[in-house]
Image (spheres, rainbow, N blue to C red):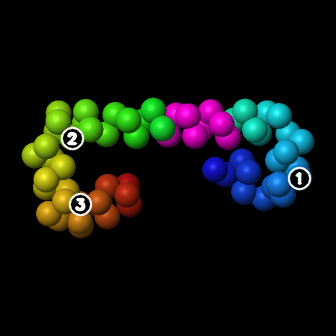
């Protein structure tokens, strides 16, 4: 998380907004991770192609 990158723990500990933002970011990540099985059921052919050809991931991430 970029907003805590240059903070010390002492600074982080005193900044309630940053603590809240960090907790919220972790919560959103967890909610998205729970949906991964649903996506795999909905899009298995696409995911199989990605697993077989890792170069697809490089193309996606470079855009």
Q: Most prominent secondary structure in the magenta stretch?
A: helix
Q: Name the residue under label 2.
A: 40
Q: Which residue is drawn at 18% across and 49% down?
A: 47
Secondary structure under tag 2 reads: helix
* Label of residue 56 in the image: 3
Secondary structure under tag 3 reads: helix
Q: Earlier in the sequence, mark 1 or mark 2?
A: 1
Foreground of the two, 8 or 50: 8
* Disc 1 from disc 2: Cα separation: 41 Å
* Label of residue 10 in the image: 1
Residue 54 lies, with reference to residue 38, above or below; the image says: below
Q: Position of residue 4 (x, y in %)?
A: 74, 51
Q: Based on the displayed image, in which of its 4 quarters is residue 50 positioned?
A: bottom left
The C terminus lies in which quarter of the figure?
bottom left
Locate residue 45 relative to residue 51 in the image: left or right: left
Is-magenta flag for residue 23? Answer: yes
Closer to us: mark 2 or mark 3?
A: 2
Q: Residue at x 21, y 40 (%)?
A: 40
Foreground of the two, 62 or 48: 48
Q: Answer whether labels 1 and 3 touch (C-beta < 8 Å).
A: no
* Disc 2 from disc 3: Cα separation: 17 Å
* Disc 1 from disc 3: Cα separation: 42 Å
Q: Based on the displayed image, in which of its 4 quarters is residue 20 positioned?
A: top right
Q: Earlier in the sequence, mark 1 or mark 3?
A: 1
Q: What stretch is highlighted in magenta?
A: 22-29
Q: Position of residue 26 (x, y in %)?
A: 58, 40
Secondary structure under tag 1 reads: helix
Disc 3 residue crowd, few under 14, some 14–19, many 20+, Cα 10 Å: few
């Amino acid at each position: 998380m970029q907003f805590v990158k240059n903070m010390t723990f002492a600074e982080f500990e005193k900044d309630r907004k940053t603590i809240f933002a960090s907790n919220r970011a972790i919560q959103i990540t967890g909610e998205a991770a729970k949906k991964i099985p649903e996506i795999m059921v909905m899009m298995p052919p696409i995911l199989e192609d990605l697993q077989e050809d890792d170069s697809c991931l490089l193309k996606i991430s470079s855009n």
